[in-house]
Every structure is written in C-alpha cells, then in structure tokens.
Image (cartoon, rainbow, N blue to C red):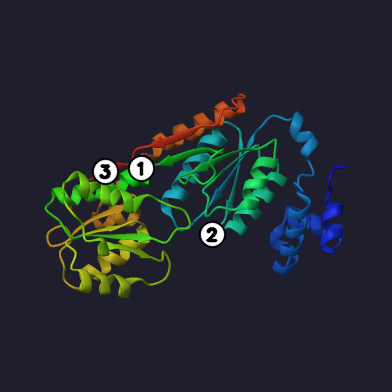
C-alpha cells in the first residue's frame, strides 16, 4: 500500500493538516515540527506529491532550480538567464535556496517535487544520503547537478575548477610571480583547485611553497586572516576564489598601499561585478554556453533521453591587467 501524508502525520504525531502544510508551505510550520515531519517522511520514504497521478499524464512544464548560495552572483545570473529562456518556452520556473546546507537542499527537493517539478537543477552543497535516496526513488523527476559533481549516477554540468586554478597560476607565473597565494574557500566537496595550482607549477618546472595554499571561510570578515597571510608568506601573486574574497583581498592591499597588478598580481575566480569594477583579471565562465548546454540537457531529457549526461566545460580567462 502506498504511503500517504496521513501516514506521515501519524508517525510524526501531528494533524494531517499540519503535515500537508509542511510539504506545501514549510515556512508556515515551526522548525521543530517541520523537522519531526521530515524525519517521518524519510523513515517512510514518502514523496509529498498530492498531484502525482496527474503529473504522469501531464506535459512536463516545470523546472526547479536549487541555488546553493544566493550571494554568489554567478549562480543568480544563471538563474536569471535560465528563467527568461524557460518563460519564453511557456515553462514554469521554481527557485529554492539551500544556503550551502544539505538539509535545506533536501527540503527544497521535497517542496519542488510536491509542486510538480518535472526536472530539478541543483548545485550540491555536500553529499547527502537522504538526497541521494530521494533522487533514486523519485521516478517522474529528472535531476541535473550544476557546477559540482557529487552523485555519480546523476546528470551533471560542471566547469573545470582544477583547470581554472591551473590557468590562474599559469597567468601569474607568466607575469613573473613566483610566490602565489591561493585563497581557497571552505567546501564540503572537493574542488580540485589545489591540484590545479600544483599542476601549473609542475608544468613550469617549479616547486611551490605549499604554505601558500590557504583555505578561508566564505562568510564574515576575513581581512585580518588575509593580512596575516600577507605578513607571514609575502606573496607576490594572489588568487581569491570568490567575489567575497576578491573584495576583501583588494581592500587589504589598498590599505597597505600595495598597487594591484604592479606590485602584487591578482587573478580572481568568477567575473563578478566586484572584479569588473576593480579591473581584476579573472578565470570566469562562458555563461551563454552554459545556458545553451542546460537548455539542451533539459530538451533531451523531456524528449525521453534516459542516458546519463556528464558535461565538462573549460573556464575562460578574462584579462584586465591585474596579473
């Protein structure tokens, strides 16, 4: 017998109305109660889709997108451009925010499944056994990972982070820099940036000082940590891997009267508004190509293609003279 929302309500010790509200409008349910209901749903392997039967016979016209970091301009740019393209095709577009949290990611998945999404695009924040089980057990929804490849049997489209780091280091080496500081961001998933950094030094026949491989939090004020690294390691080149770290790096350099590009080279990740305004050379992404590839993956999936796709795109170097 199929599990229903009433079964979930009984397991969680709440009313049927509260359980239904948790899946349709989770923001209206207290955090403690919501967690109890979601725990019950996981235990029963319940898919909260009151319209599942009609979905089977309807045309797929809703795409969900779970953004892992709303403060990342690259992610929001992709969402904005994709929304325009899908609206032009008379398709619906739903956005969820996971805030780099696997539990929130799972909740977003449940909500979008409940609202009849035929496809869910998401950027994994971390590996989650619960998300993986939901992906495997939800038959009427196609999932595509964007920019991070966490689940091997799920479609994916990524930009090669390892190659991006190699390009950034290579660019600084070509400008005569040798003590290159990588300001990487904390991540629950491997990025390959450290390996890409070492690849560039190896191809140049040089041995790096691995103390220059630093990892920082991507939230809060990191200027003191950046200043300490500058004092201790005396880098002549810096690679901040996010808009957040780029802004704080340039702030510290300016406070010290250091001329970016002349005294210290900077090559950042992502062609963000901050990098553009400050004239920073970046390792970026071909957003139009990304949108075209996503559209093609969506079209092929809706046309019945069941083969898993794993697409890797090269990053692009945008020079502005800061290297």
Q: CA distance from mark 1 to mark 3?
A: 8 Å
Q: Position of residue 140 (x, y in %)?
A: 70, 35
Q: Position of residue 107 (x, y in %)?
A: 66, 55
Question: Visible in this render: residue 257?
Answer: yes
Give the structural element (helix, strand or loop) at label 2: loop
Asked if the residue under mark 2 is in contact with the one under mark 1, i.e. CB atoms within 8 Å, the reply is no
Asked if the residue under mark 3 is in contact with the one under mark 1, i.e. CB atoms within 8 Å, the reply is no
Q: Position of residue 58 (x, y in %)?
A: 73, 30
Q: Which residue is mark 3?
A: 317
Between 161 and 84, the one nearer to me in the picture: 161
Query: Dividing the image into 4 quarters, which one contains the N terminus?
Result: top right
Q: Report crowding for label 1: few under 14, some 14 to 19, many 20 or more residues within 10 A (C-alpha).
A: many
Identity of the residue drawn at 76% across and 60% down: 37
Q: Is residue 24 above or below residue 144?
A: below
Give the structural element (helix, strand or loop) at label 1: loop
Looking at the rendered structure, which numbered label has been put on residue 285? 1
Q: CA distance from mark 3 to mark 2?
A: 28 Å
Q: Is residue 193 left or right of residue 105?
A: left
Q: Is residue 123 left or right of residue 318?
A: right
Give the structural element (helix, strand or loop) at label 3: strand
Q: Is residue 322 above or below residue 228?
A: above
Looking at the rendered structure, which numbered label has been put on residue 99? 2
Q: CA distance from mark 1 to mark 2?
A: 22 Å
Counting residues from the N terminus, which is met first, the one under dot 1 or under dot 3? 1
């Amino acid at each position: 017998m199929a599990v229903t929302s009433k079964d979930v309500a009984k397991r969680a010790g709440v009313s049927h109305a509260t359980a239904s509200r948790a899946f349709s409008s989770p923001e209206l349910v207290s955090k403690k109660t919501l967690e109890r209901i979601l725990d019950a749903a996981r235990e029963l392997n319940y898919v909260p889709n009151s319209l599942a039967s009609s979905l089977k016979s309807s045309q797929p016209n809703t795409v969900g997108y779970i953004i892992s970091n709303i403060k990342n301009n690259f992610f929001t740019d992709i969402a904005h451009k994709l929304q325009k393209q899908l609206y032009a095709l008379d398709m619906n577009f739903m956005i969820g925010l996971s805030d780099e949290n696997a539990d929130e990611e799972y909740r977003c998945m449940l909500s979008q499944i409940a609202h009849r999404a035929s496809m869910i695009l998401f950027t994994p924040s971390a590996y989650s056994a619960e998300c993986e089980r939901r992906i495997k057990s939800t038959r009427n929804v196609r999932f595509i990972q964007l920019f991070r490849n966490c689940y091997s049997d799920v479609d994916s489209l990524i930009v090669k982070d390892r190659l991006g780091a190699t390009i950034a280091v290579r660019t600084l080496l070509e400008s005569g820099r040798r003590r290159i500081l990588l300001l990487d961001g904390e991540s629950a998933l491997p990025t390959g940036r450290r390996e890409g950094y070492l690849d560039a030094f190896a191809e140049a026949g040089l041995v790096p000082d691995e103390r220059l491989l630093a990892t920082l939090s991507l939230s809060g004020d990191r200027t003191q940590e950046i200043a300490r690294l500058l004092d201790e390691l005396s880098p002549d080149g810096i690679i901040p891997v996010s808009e957040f770290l780029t802004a704080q790096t340039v702030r510290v350099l300016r406070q010290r009267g250091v001329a970016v590009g002349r005294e210290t080279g900077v090559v950042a990740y992502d062609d963000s508004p901050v990098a553009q305004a400050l004239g920073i050379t970046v390792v970026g992404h071909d957003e139009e190509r990304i949108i075209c590839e996503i559209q093609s993956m969506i079209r092929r999936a809706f046309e019945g293609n069941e083969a898993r796709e794993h697409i890797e795109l090269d990053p692009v170097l945008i020079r502005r003279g800061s290297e």
